[in-house]
Amino acid sequence: MTEFGSLNWSILIIYIVANLALGAVIGKRIDTADDFYLGQKQTPWWAIGISVIATYVSAMTFLGAPAWAYSDGISVIALHLNYPLVIMAVIIFFFPFFYNAGVTSIYEYQEKRFGKRARGLISTIYLLSQTMNSAAVLYATSLVLSFITGVPVVWAIVIVTIIALVYTIMGGITAVIWTDVIQAGILFVGAGIIMYALIDQSSMPFSETLSQLKSDGKLNPLNWDVDFTEQTTIWSGIIAMTFFHITVYGSNQMMVQRTLAAKNIGDAKKSYLMMGFCAFFIYFFFIVLGVLFYNYYEGKPFEDNNMIILQFATDYGLPGLMGLIAAAVMAASMSSLDSAFNSLSTITTIDFYRKYFKKDETEQHYLKASRVFTFAWALIIIVPAILYHLFSEGSSILEVLSKVGSYFVGAQLGMFALGFFSKQATENGLLVGTLTGFVVVTAVALGTDISWPWYCIIGASTNVVVTIVASIAIDGKQHSYSSYTIKGQQAKFQQEGLSEKENGWYLVPGRVDKINYVLLGFFFVTVGFLALVQYMDF
């Protein structure tokens, strides 16, 4: 590629310094471990919402979505149609349990519902899965630094880790949220410039471009085939990936922890509703970007499709653009890495260190421990990131990251579903069912051609069935619902005369806030829009 140049370096360095400075400023307000985890519960809902979007969307999207769409076309959007359904499920069923219990670790719910072993199991699953996901994100960004500077990928991995680590250690979850807001702005400005440049550089009118892409089969978003070996069918998107994303947004400490920093449950729900309404547009934008790249480069093969967006920025040659894009991709990575570091440290400190090793220490002690664990997890994540570099073979980062997560999410979803809905599930049965689910998913992955989006629902359904059978066999039939099931919570609110709402938002699980019906209507509108794209002639 061309020389990176002083202007590009200046943009990139200013971005890095701004993040570190913000972390240092916020760090002065961190006095206790709870400040580190929850930020004194004073963060506005819109900042939390942007942080949620930046954390999950950007890390998987800036490089990966255009790369995936370049090869598979706009059908990739099918996997992201489900967000309205996902957000509805999470704020109706998950959030009330976490807020009513006043937890910092969401896996404390598992102990209240089942017992210590269940909490230890799901916390361990989270630590393993988040480490692998974060490593994939870290690897994605290292490609950028290597591409633009010539620095070896392994060194790039270390550099990005250090930058994200420093401001996360200083400022905790508050620094994570506010740096995410900045990073989201940089990300979308960079992506917008690329979209404009791509359309501007096209050799034909935009309508002709769409017509050509249609004839090439790149503008067919809805694949109705009932084929479990295909990744991007409408069925895998609406059924399989709905369950996958419910797990990501409802039972993932990294995603939920920032909402626990909200002032109240209404603000927490509003922050997630932002994702419910915005996710389709964001994913659609980046996927369209990928098919426009396909047209621009006439479908020529790349050694690594993840580098297409960077190659185009280089070819376009706008002064400062590569610096902005480099900053945007670093933002895409660090908005997820900082969240991962903070949440991994939180779970390690609360679910293991404070619970089993140091039970009665001061808040300052736990704050120091949290920062030490943040540092430790950053070092650990470097190892699988290097392994991704050695074995990813240029496949889409979005696809790689999704495949890794699919091995774990079924177990998490099954454990929460059983906790919420099952009368018969006991801790002994749950342990048997969860381990059986892992075995079944592994067998499906290694022994069949079933695509990864279905692994979650396969693992979760196996877990549910085996857990109920094993629970009855080991502990006998249960004759009443636990108070930590949805029915149990609803009965508790009624019996104790508790108010079901706070500031107009439901506190009791299973109740539907009115805005959810609007979100459901939005889901059907997006499906209708894609059907129009599918069948219209350009």
Image (tube, rainbow, N blue to C red):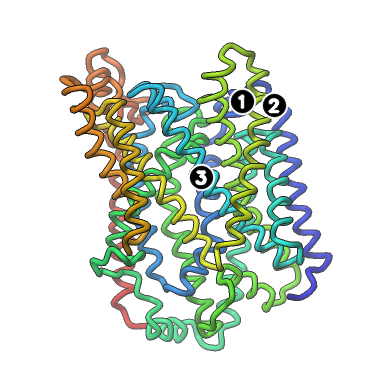
Give the CA separation, mark 2 to mark 1. Answer: 8 Å
Give the CA separation, mark 3 to mark 2. Answer: 22 Å
- Residue carrying label 1: 35
Q: Are marks 3 and 2 in contact (CB under 8 Å)?
A: no
Side (left or right) of 436 relative to 349 = left
Q: Are marks 2 and 1 in contact (CB under 8 Å)?
A: yes
Label 1 amino acid?
Asp
Label 3 amino acid?
Val
In primary-sequence order, the first of circles 2 and 1 is 2
Label 2 amino acid?
Arg
Q: Position of residue 267 (x, y in %)?
A: 46, 34
Side (left or right) of 124 relative to 425 = right
Indicate the secondary structure of the residue bearing disc 2. loop
Q: Residues within 10 Å of mark 1 (few under 14, many from 20)?
A: many
Q: Position of residue 54 (x, y in %)?
A: 55, 50
- Residue carrying label 3: 52
Quarter assignment of residue 503: top left
- Screen quadrant of the C terminus: bottom left
> At 74% from the left edge and 50% from the top edge, which residue is drawn?
16
- Screen quadrant of the N terminus: bottom right
